[in-house]
Image: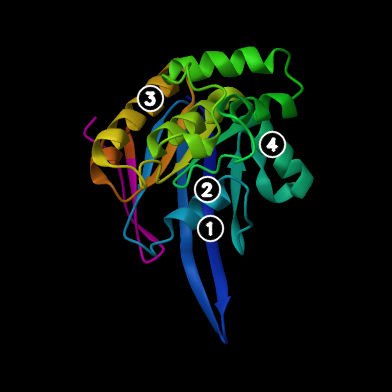
């Protein structure tokens, strides 16, 4: 299978007062189409920074990233946004649902942005799949944390992304709820044939993916197939 994501010699640093802090040091790896992939490491190891760069949300100091056959450096901000809208799904630790929209409206937003017909019908179908068919008219404040994350998972798959980035998707959930969300994420992923990239500090979750990349101090210390 072809690579959907190619990362080569990525370096990223931030200014902190008078100091320059390098967060990522010459990071290189590839992810194949349909692969499930985990990025793990302790807090401050650069996991979330790396995910943001891979998804085109931020720019590296040096190195290059090719996502879905397009080199991100060659795109301006509008072109990057278009690439994300067409090809990428996101699931975040803090859900990031729009509070003034219902569950259904939150799921339908990416479809409407693409000008899809029957966005509402497809949104309902996805909410049924994640077990929230009876919550379509509820606002985020009326849903539990687990229900909000299931809405976020449904939204992430709504535009049929080629690749989905999940940043600590179970980080704000209790163990039982987190496990249900994990199952949904992997089930929908298999069904859709999406590439799944998960940033997590949870090794149990990481070991459910096909490959694990371990970071420490902004460097790759391991890049291996998992036991799955």
Find the distance from the CA under tag 1 to the CA under tag 4.
20 Å
> For the residues marked 4 and 3, what is the alpha-carbon distance in whole angstroms?
25 Å
Dots 4, 3 in contact, CB < 8 A: no
Q: Quadrant of the C terminus?
A: top left
Q: Nearer the viewer, residue 170 or 144?
A: 144
Residue at image mark 4: 83
Q: In terms of sequence position, does the residue under pointer 2 or pointer 4 come before the other?
A: 2
Rendering coords of residue 146 (x, y %): 38, 35
Q: Which of marks 4 and 3 is nearer the N terminus?
A: 4
- Compute the Cα span from label 2 to label 1: 7 Å
Q: Which of marks 1 and 4 is nearer the N terminus?
A: 1
Tell me which segment is drawn in magenta: 212-228
Q: In screen coordinates, is 176 left or right of 34?
A: left
Q: In this view, does 5 lie to the left or right of 36?
A: right
Q: Which mark is first along the chain, 3 or 1?
A: 1
For discs 4 and 3, the disc positioned in front in the rendered view: 3
Where residue 23 appears, as percent x and y from the top left, is 47, 67
Which structural element holds mark 3?
helix
Image disc number at residue 10 = 1
Q: Which of 122 and 84 is in front in this view?
A: 122
Q: In the figure, is residue 175 to the left or right of 172?
A: left
Question: Disc 2 marks which residue?
Answer: 7
Between marks 1 and 4 in the image, the one whose residue lies nearer the viewer: 4
Specify the principal SS of the magenta part: strand
Vertical relation: 65 (above or below) 12 = above
Q: Is mark 2 on a helix, strand or loop?
A: strand
State yes or no: discs 2 and 1 in contact (Cβ < 8 Å).
yes
- Residue 225 part of the magenta-drawn span: yes
Please tell me how crowded label 4 is: few (under 14), some (14-19), or many (20+) other residues with Cα within 10 Å: some
| Crowd around label 2: few <14 · some 14–19 · many ≥20 (10 Å) | many
Does dot 1 land on a helix, a strand or a loop? strand
Residue lying at 31% horizontally and 28% vertically, measured from the top left: 180
């Amino acid at each position: 299978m072809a690579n959907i994501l190619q990362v080569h010699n990525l370096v990223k640093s931030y200014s902190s007062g008078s100091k320059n802090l390098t967060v990522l040091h010459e990071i290189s790896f590839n992810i194949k189409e349909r692969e499930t992939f985990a990025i793990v490491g302790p807090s401050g190891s650069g996991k979330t920074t790396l995910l943001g760069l891979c998804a085109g949300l931020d720019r590296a100091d040096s190195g290059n990233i090719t996502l879905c056959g397009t080199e991100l450096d060659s795109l301006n901000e509008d072109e990057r946004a278009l690439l994300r809208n067409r090809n990428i799904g996101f699931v975040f630790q803090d859900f990031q649902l729009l509070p003034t929209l219902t569950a259904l409206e939150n799921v339908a937003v990416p479809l409407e942005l693409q000008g899809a017909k029957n966005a509402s019908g497809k949104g309902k179908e996805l909410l049924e799949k994640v077990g929230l068919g009876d919550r379509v008219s509820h606002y985020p404040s009326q849903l539990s944390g687990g229900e909000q994350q299931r809405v976020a998972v449904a939204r992430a798959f709504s535009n049929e992304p080629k690749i989905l980035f999940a940043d600590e998707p179970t980080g704000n959930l209790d163990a039982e709820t987190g496990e249900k969300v994990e199952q949904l994420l992997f089930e929908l992923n298999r069904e859709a044939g999406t590439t799944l990239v998960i940033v997590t500090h949870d090794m149990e979750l990481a070991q459910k993916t096909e490959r694990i990349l371990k970071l420490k101090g902004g460097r790759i210390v391991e890049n291996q197939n998992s036991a799955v």
